[in-house]
């Protein structure tokens, strides 16, 4: 029973997306380009597990501090205080976070990258303070969580790629990771704004100062709609520039990423119900997944 609650608490489906991203990048994209990698296979899985455990801990601590808002925003999905005690959740958080930090820091020491330990430590601290305080700071909390989501797979780049090697493959990796990071950041920022609108009632009840509370739901949903233009512009440039060379990948991006994102941008202007905002949030998550899958399409079909 408790194990089922634990897996719900750590958002195991979201963690699977992280694992899928790592898998696509390491075993398809890097292999396709014949990149000389720095990590052994066990070290790669150690990095992946570290990221997963630290992210899982972030979900737990977020639910601990969101008890009062979740009682209003999603009472049927409330876990901490309803399914398990707050004390039990704290113990799970400490255990999960500690495992993640040990795995990450030991990997840095074993690969002679001690300075990268700061990324794991900083991420852990930011996830904690985001849940405790920064979430209530308008925009700053949205920016931080969007940046941390992006950092989860950027870590793979820092560990695996030798930047001292200057060749065409490494240059392409840098371009792809830059585009992927920007796309991920903007998409997650839009999703954070949508989730804030969805949760406005509970957030208002506990005096959080989120953007929809400060400026109103209508203004923020319009801002989220306009913000969609940035990843759309990014996608349009990629498709326009590479359509002649990578036809199948470009067509895939057009049909399964760009057009759905256009739909989100338009739909955001007209919706008003909590359920509608929840659906848009889910669509944005699917778009992110499909965007990652485009890398697999690129390596297999061009």
Image (cartoon, helix red, strand yellow):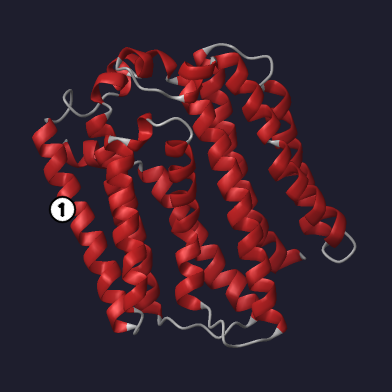
Tell me where residue 129 appears, x and y as whole percent.
29, 42
Does residue 55 appear anywhere in the picture? yes
- Farthest residue toward the right? 244
68, above or below 130, in the image: above
Answer left or right for 82 relative to 224.
Answer: left
Q: How many numbered tags mark residues here?
A: 1
Tell me where residue 270 appears, x and y as whole percent.
68, 14
Tell me where residue 53 appears, x and y as whole percent.
29, 55
Determine the image quadrant of residue 81: top left
Residue density around tag 1, few if under 14, some if 14–19, many if 20 or more, within 10 Å: few
238, above or below 60, in the image: below
248, above or below 156, in the image: above
Residue that label 1 marks: 95
Q: Quadrant of the N terminus?
A: top left
Determine the image quadrant of residue 261: top right
Tell me where residue 254 appears, x and y as whole percent.
79, 46
- Farthest residue toward the left? 87
Q: In which quarter of the image is the C terminus?
A: bottom right
Does residue 49 appear anywhere in the picture? no
Along the line of sight, the residue nearer the viewer: 89 or 26: 89
Q: Disc 1 on helix, strand or loop? A: helix
Along the line of sight, the residue nearer the viewer: 145 or 254: 145
245, above or below 238, in the image: below
Q: Residue drawn at (32%, 12%), measured in percent from left and top?
A: 205
Answer left or right for 126 relative to 190.
Answer: left
Q: Residue drawn at (33%, 66%), measured in percent from left and top?
A: 118
Q: Residue drawn at (65%, 76%), measured in percent from left and top?
A: 32
Answer left or right for 134 relative to 174.
Answer: left
């Amino acid at each position: 029973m408790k194990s089922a609650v634990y897996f719900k608490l750590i958002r195991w489906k979201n963690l699977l997306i992280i694992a899928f991203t790592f898998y696509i990048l390491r075993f398809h994209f890097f292999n396709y380009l014949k990149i000389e990698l720095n990590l052994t296979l066990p070290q790669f899985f150690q990095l992946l597990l570290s990221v997963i455990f630290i992210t899982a801990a972030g979900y737990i601590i977020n639910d601990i501090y969101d008890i009062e808002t979740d009682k209003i925003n999603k009472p049927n999905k409330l876990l901490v205080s309803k399914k398990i005690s707050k004390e039990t959740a704290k113990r799970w958080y400490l255990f999960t976070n500690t495992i993640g930090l040990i795995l990450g820091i030991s990997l840095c020491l074993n690969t002679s990258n001690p300075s990268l330990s700061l990324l794991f430590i900083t991420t852990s601290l930011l996830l904690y303070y985001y849940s405790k305080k920064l979430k209530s700071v308008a925009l700053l909390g949205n920016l931080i969580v969007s940046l941390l989501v992006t950092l989860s797979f950027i870590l793979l780049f820092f560990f695996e790629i030798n930047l001292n090697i200057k060749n065409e493959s490494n240059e392409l990796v840098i371009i792809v990771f830059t585009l992927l990071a920007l796309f991920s950041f903007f998409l997650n920022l839009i999703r954070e704004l949508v989730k804030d609108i969805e949760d406005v009632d509970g957030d208002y009840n506990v005096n959080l100062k989120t953007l929809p509370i400060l400026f109103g739901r209508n203004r923020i949903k319009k801002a989220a709609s306009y913000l969609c233009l940035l990843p759309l512009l990014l996608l349009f440039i990629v498709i326009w520039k590479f359509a002649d060379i990578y036809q199948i990948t470009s067509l895939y991006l057009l049909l399964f990423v760009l057009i759905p994102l256009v739909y989100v941008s338009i739909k955001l202007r007209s919706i008003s119900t909590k359920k509608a905002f929840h659906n848009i949030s889910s669509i944005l998550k699917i778009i992110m997944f499909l965007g990652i899958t485009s890398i697999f399409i690129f390596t297999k079909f061009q």
